[in-house]
Image: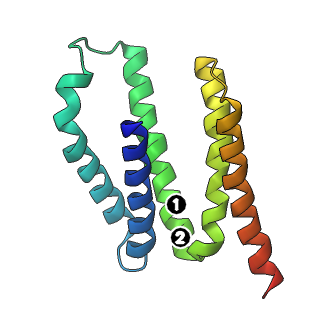
Amino acid sequence: VACALGAALFYAAYQLLTRKLVATEPALRLLFYTALFGTLAMSPTLPWAWDGRLPTLAQAGLIVSLGVYGGVGHFFLIRAFRQTPAALLSPLLYVQLVWATLLGWLAFGDLPDWISVAGMLVIAASGLFLIVDRRHFR
């Protein structure tokens, strides 16, 4: 629970800082500092997470591809925040719930329980309400 709460807090901070800094900072600078902060913050946890075995070539490729996909995704997020108001873009980020569920099922054979699905539906409905409500009153 503590790890999930910490991840949610750091993700929220990441989203808020990206929204604020996108107006004044170039995209590559934001990418660099995000990677630098993540590296510095997570490196002290390495002794507890790594058992000493080196990854195989296939595993190393997956690790590198994860970094590339994350970097490209963050770059696109920066560009989207630069060109679209955050209030309109933020509800669209809820599509991550669908992808996380699908990938969790495909990679690990894990599906969320009914309470998790109910929570996801509340979050998605809130995002859709914000989109519909904003268009209705303009």
Q: For the residue marked with disc 1, what is the amino acid?
A: Leu
Q: Work out whether residue 77 or residue 132 is closer to the camera in this orientation and state it.
A: 132
Q: Is residue 64 left or right of residue 118?
A: left
Nearest the viewer among 10 and 38 is 10
Q: Which residue is mark 2?
A: 81
For label 2, count other residues whose C-alpha is less than 10 Å away and answer few (under 14), some (14-19) or many (20+).
Answer: many
Dividing the picture into quarters, in which one does residue 64 lie? top left
Is there a contact, CB below 8 Å, between mark 2 and mark 1? yes
Measured as percent of width and height from the top left, residue 132 is found at 80, 72
Determine the residue positioned at 19% across, 46% down. 40
Residue 37, placed above or below residue 81: above
Left/right placement of residue 137 relative to residue 67 reads: right
SS label for mark 1: helix
Residue 22 position in % (x across, y down):
42, 73
Callout 2 amino acid:
Phe
- Secondary structure of the residue carrying tag 2 is helix
Report the quarter where the N terminus lies: top left
Q: Is residue 14 left or right of residue 123?
A: left
- Check disc 1 and report the residue beneath it: 77
The local crowd at label 1, few if under 14, some if 14 to 19, many if 20 or more residues have their Cα within 10 Å, is some
Rendered position, 122 above or below 23 = above
The picture quadrant where one finds residue 27 is: bottom left
